[in-house]
Amino acid sequence: MSIVKINVLTVPEDQRETLEKRFAARAGSVEGSDGFEWFELLRPVEGTDTYLVYTRWRTEEDFQNWMSGRGQAAHGGGSAGGERPKPAASDATLWSFEVVQQAAPRQD
C-alpha cells in the first residue's frame, strides 16, 4: 500500500494568502513525479493556524527520490540566483504514515 506524507505548517493569519498563492503557482510541479498519487492543501477552518499539506506516494523511495530532486528545488534547495522569498510558515513538521486500509465511494 501507499505511504502518506503530511507537512504540518504553522501559518500566521497575515501569511495565509501568500502561502496559498505559492502553492497555486507550483501547480504541476509534483504531479508528473514517479510514484506520486495525490496532493491536497488543507486550510484550517477554525481554532488553529495550522495548514496540512497531504501527499500520497507509491513508496517511501518514490518520495525520497522526489525530495532529492524536484522537491528540493520546490522547497528552495535548488533556487538559482536571486533572493529567496521569506517563508510564509513560521514552523513546519513532517508526519509519515503507511496506508493500511482505504475505501472509495461505491460505483453502483
Image (cartoon, rainbow, N blue to C red):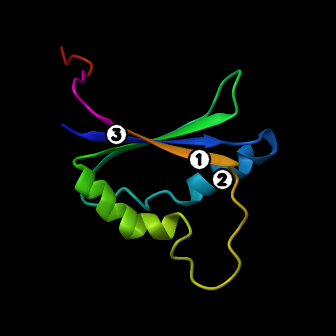
- What kind of residue is marked 2? Lys
Is 10 drawn above or below residue 107 in the view shown?
A: below
Quadrant hosting residue 16: top right
Please give the name of the residue rendered at 56% of the width and 69% of the height, measured from the top-left corner: 76
Is 2 drawn above or below residue 27 in the view shown?
A: above
Disc 1 crowd rating (10 Å Cα; few below 14, some 14-19, many 20+) is some
Label 2, label 1: how far apart the Cα atoms are:
18 Å
- What kind of residue is marked 3? Val
Taking the view exactly as shown, the residue that stands out farthest to the right is 14
Q: Secondary structure at mark 3?
A: strand
Reading the chain from its start, which is encountered first: label 3 or label 2?
3
Residue beneath disc 2: 21
Q: Between 90 and 42, which is closer to the camera in this rendering?
A: 90
Image quadrant occupied by the N terminus: top left
Tell me whether circle 3 and circle 2 mark residues in contact (CB < 8 Å).
no
Q: Is residue 35 visible?
A: no
Q: Between 7 and 38, which is closer to the camera in this rendering?
A: 7
Q: Between 59 and 20, which is closer to the camera in this rendering?
A: 59
Q: Position of residue 2 (x, y in %)?
A: 23, 40
Q: Secondary structure at mark 1?
A: strand
Q: Position of residue 107 (x, y in %)?
A: 19, 19
Please give the name of the residue rendered at 66% of the width and 24% of the height, measured from the top-left corner: 45
Residue 102 within the magenta-colored segment of the rendering: yes
Label 1, label 3: how far apart the Cα atoms are:
16 Å
Label 3, label 2: how far apart the Cα atoms are:
23 Å
Magenta stretch: give its range.
Answer: 97-103
- Residue 92 image label: 1
Report the predominant secondary structure element of the magenta stretch: loop
Residue beneath disc 3: 4
- What kind of residue is marked 1? Ala
